[in-house]
């Protein structure tokens, strides 16, 4: 499963639990966001690292294409 989907699942689980305990409205969303952020740090460490490597590779390939385009323009 992707990192983002797992983060959303943790958030919605926190929302559900807090709603069962009587928390409502804007407070519910803020507290659920804080809880899901804290829980996801150790729980999704491997997925976050994997996503980070994927994004870094993608940015590096994009930069390489830009650099190649710049070299081609400089030769012209």
Image: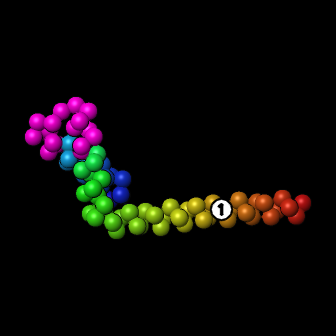
Q: Is residue 59 left or right of residue 65?
A: left
**Percent coordinates x, y for residue 15 in the rendering:** 20, 42
Res. 9 in view: no
Q: Which segment did they paint magenta? A: 16-32
Percent x, y of residue 50: 41, 67
Residue 27 colored in magenta in the image:
yes
The residue at the point 11 percent across, 36 percent down is 22
Q: Main secondary structure of the magenta part?
A: helix
Seen in the image, is 66 located left or right of residue 74? left
Query: In the shown orientation, is residue 13 left or right of residue 6?
Result: left
Q: Residue furthest top?
A: 25
Residue 33 higher or lower than 58, as above or below: above
Q: Residue 6: which quarter of the image? A: bottom left
Q: Which residue is mark 1?
A: 63
Residue that appears at 15% across and 42% down: 18
Please tell me in which quadrant of the rendered image residue 57 appears.
Answer: bottom right
Q: Name the residue rendered at 63%, 60% in the picture.
A: 62
The percent coordinates of residue 64 (x first, y second) are 67, 65
Q: Residue at x 90, y 60 (%)?
A: 76
Q: Residues within 10 Å of mark 1 (few under 14, many from 20)?
A: few
Give percent across and percent down for residue 44: 31, 62
Q: Quadrant of the N terminus?
A: bottom left
Q: In this rendering, would 69 be left or right of 27?
A: right
Q: How many marks?
A: 1
Which secondary structure lies at badge 1?
helix
Q: Looking at the picture, does residue 64 appear above or below residue 37?
A: below
């Amino acid at each position: 499963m992707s990192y983002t989907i797992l983060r959303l699942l943790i958030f919605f689980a926190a929302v559900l639990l807090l709603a069962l305990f009587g928390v409502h409205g804007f407070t519910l969303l803020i507290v659920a966001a804080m809880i899901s952020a804290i829980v996801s740090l150790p729980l999704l460490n491997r997925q976050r690292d994997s996503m980070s490597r994927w994004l870094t590779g993608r940015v590096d390939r994009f930069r390489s294409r830009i650099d190649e385009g710049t070299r081609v323009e400089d030769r012209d």
